[in-house]
Image: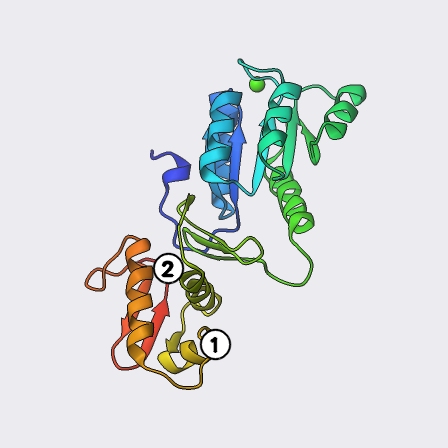
């Protein structure tokens, strides 16, 4: 059976979640539960691997087990907090109030006491995401493995950060906001370039640069599809 995190996703992902848990059975059960609910899940078995994941894959929520082999939960939390403000949901086996209060004060956003159901875990994660989302609508557009964070002006493809120019980012954000629709060059010119007239070549050139950064070609498109004579469409890969 393939690892759940590697399963092919055809639906838009809800958010990227990192699970840091050393027990392989608990870890894969959590990963399976969240993957089923359309989260893009990555996992780590030690605190240090978890921190590496945070640095390289920018999860939107971190589920942190407190009993890890390499670092104490409080230390792991402190290291995570030193590099990111991403919400951390602490998973603890002990229902000890003093310890939970200490961790909440140390930067944890919420906690769950083991054993918990997949449904409970997913509900806690959804609540954290709602709290973390800036006011005033969707700040992150997600199309399969592509996510465009409008507030941070950051785009990730399969968890990897894309190096985009300002114009490329604007173009990608506009296409992602209208995913599944054909966007005409004229719309791109007025909405992205803010020009009422101009030549289509500039737009075509930017589309091809963006395509290259997405690691695809016009002949073998994954996300960006040129509709000849009309415009461009951004779609989840088939
Ligand atoms: Ca553990």
Q: Is residue 30 visible?
A: no
Residue 227: image quadrant is: bottom left
The residue tagged 2 is 236
Look at the image and tell me in which quarter the N terminus lies. top left
Disc sitting over residue 102 in the figure: none
Front position in the image: 151 or 65: 151
Front position in the image: 144 or 49: 49
**Residue 16 picture location, percent across and down:** 50, 44
Q: Residues within 10 Å of mark 1 (few under 14, many from 20)?
A: some
Look at the image and tell me in which quarter the C terminus lies. bottom left
* C-alpha span from label 2 to label 1: 22 Å
Q: Residues within 10 Å of mark 2 (few under 14, many from 20)?
A: some
Say whether marks 2 and 1 touch (CB < 8 Å). no
**Residue 219 picture location, percent across and down:** 19, 63
Looking at the image, which residue is at 75% across and 25% down?
100
Q: On the rendered structure, is 110 left or right of 158?
A: right
Q: Secondary structure at mark 1?
A: helix
Eyeballing the image, is 159 above or below 153? above
Is ligand 1 within 8 Å of the beta carbon of the residue shown at mark 2?
Answer: no
Q: Secondary structure at mark 2?
A: loop
Looking at the image, which residue is at 70% across and 36% down?
109
Q: On the rendered structure, is 51 left or right of 85?
A: left
Residue 181: image quadrant is: bottom left
Looking at the image, which residue is at 53% across and 27% down?
20
Of the image marks 2 and 1, the number of the one nearer the N terminus: 1
Nearer the observer: mark 2 or 1; the answer is 1
Looking at the image, which residue is at 59% across and 36% down?
84
Disc sitting over residue 191 in the figure: 1
Eyeballing the image, is 146 above or below 76? below
**Residue 115 picture location, percent across and down:** 64, 26
């Amino acid at each position: 059976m393939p690892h759940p995190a590697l399963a092919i996703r055809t639906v838009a992902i809800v958010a990227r979640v990192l699970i840091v848990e050393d027990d392989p059975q608990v870890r894969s059960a959590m990963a399976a539960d969240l993957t089923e609910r359309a989260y893009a899940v990555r996992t780590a078995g030690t605190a240090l691997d978890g921190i590496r994941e945070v640095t390289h894959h920018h999860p939107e929520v971190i589920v942190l087990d407190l009993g890890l082999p390499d670092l104490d939960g409080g230390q792991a939390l402190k290291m995570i907090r030193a590099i990111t403000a991403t919400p951390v949901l602490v998973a603890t086996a002990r229902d000890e109030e003093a310890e939970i209060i200490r961790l909440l004060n140390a930067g944890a956003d919420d906690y769950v006491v083991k054993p918990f159901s997949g449904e409970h875990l997913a509900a806690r994660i959804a609540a954290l995401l709602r709290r973390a989302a800036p006011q005033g609508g969707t700040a992150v557009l997600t199309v399969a493995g592509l996510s465009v964070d409008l507030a941070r002006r950051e785009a990730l493809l399969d968890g990897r950060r894309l190096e985009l120019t300002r114009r490329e980012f604007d173009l990608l954000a506009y296409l992602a906001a209208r995913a599944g629709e054909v966007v005409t060059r004229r719309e791109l010119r007025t909405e992205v370039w803010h020009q009422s007239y101009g030549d289509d070549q500039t737009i075509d050139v930017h589309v091809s640069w963006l395509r290259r950064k997405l690691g695809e070609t016009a002949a073998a498109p994954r996300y960006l599809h040129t509709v000849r004579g009309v415009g461009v469409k951004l779609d989840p890969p088939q």
